Image (cartoon, rainbow, N blue to C red):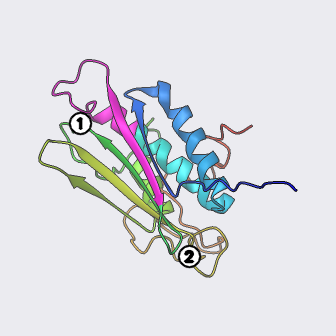
Amino acid sequence: MALVVAQEVPTSSSMAVPHGPAGVGQARQRMREQLRSHGVSDSVVDDAVLILSELLSNACRHGRPLGRHSDVGEGDVRAAWRVDRTGGLTVEVTDGGGPTRPVPATPSVTARGGRGLNIISALAEKWGVRDDSSGEVTVWVLVNEGPGRPGGRPAGQGNGRATGTTVLPGATGMPVVPGLDGLDLADAFDDAG
């Protein structure tokens, strides 16, 4: 007789990520493995991993490490994700705050950056910013598999907010971020292969 032990995969996870690019790949890989093993669809996992990358990049570029009150020095930011009972996935990144608030930018077509929160707006059901009394800033994003379309947003509906996204006539109905139309970002942050 064989004994089979089922291991329950956590529906939430939190990890310290070094303030800088070093830990971003590790965080993406951990998220991808945990969400896939929990049965989250590949398209939602892909969206969540891209969102996590953008949030961590923004935290490292614009925020301070946790527990620090200067822009210099090593430290960590916190990445967390959880799946609720309805299948909604929330991704959060917390840093020590910074000189600016997270708001979507309107970069020129030739700008090297400034599109991260617009990408998040296109992929997310909703997102927001939460401050706490110690100066920590958390940017949270809700990614919902939702009905009507395997793996995410209902076709043609975007994220319910017009800011930063448009739907091109005759296109598949997916939101397009100005300046990024025509780019294939599907494998840009894939650490699995």
* Figure quadrant of residue 26: top right
Magenta stretch encompasses residue 31: no
Residue 131 place in picture, x, y as percent: 19, 51
Residue depicted at x 21% and y 31%:
67
- In the displayed image of the protein, which residue is found farthest to the right? 1
Indicate whether 102 appears above or below 25. Answer: below
- In the displayed image of the protein, which residue is found farthest to the top? 73
Circle 2 residue: 146
Residue depicted at x 46% and y 58%:
82
Magenta stretch encompasses residue 76: yes
Closer to the camera in the image, 9 or 125: 9
Residue depicted at x 45% and y 69%:
125
Residue 49 place in picture, x, y as percent: 55, 48
Closer to the camera in the image, 36 or 166: 36
Residue depicted at x 20% and y 42%:
100
Is 11 displayed left or right of 116 in the figure? right
Tell me the kind of residue under disc 1: Gly
Residue 186 visible, this orientation: yes
Tell me the kind of residue under disc 2: Gly
What's the magenta region?
57-82
The quadrant of the image that shows the C terminus is top right
Closer to the camera in the image, 107 or 15: 15
Secondary structure at numbered mark 1 = loop
Mark 2 packing: few (<14 Cα in 10 Å), some, or many (20+)?
some
- In the displayed image of the protein, which residue is found farthest to the front? 1
Circle 1 residue: 96
Secondary structure at numbered mark 2 = loop
Residue 69 place in picture, x, y as percent: 15, 28
The quadrant of the image that shows the N terminus is bottom right
Is 17 displayed left or right of 128 in the figure? right
Task: State the mark number for residue 152.
Answer: none
Indicate whether 147 appears above or below 144. Answer: below
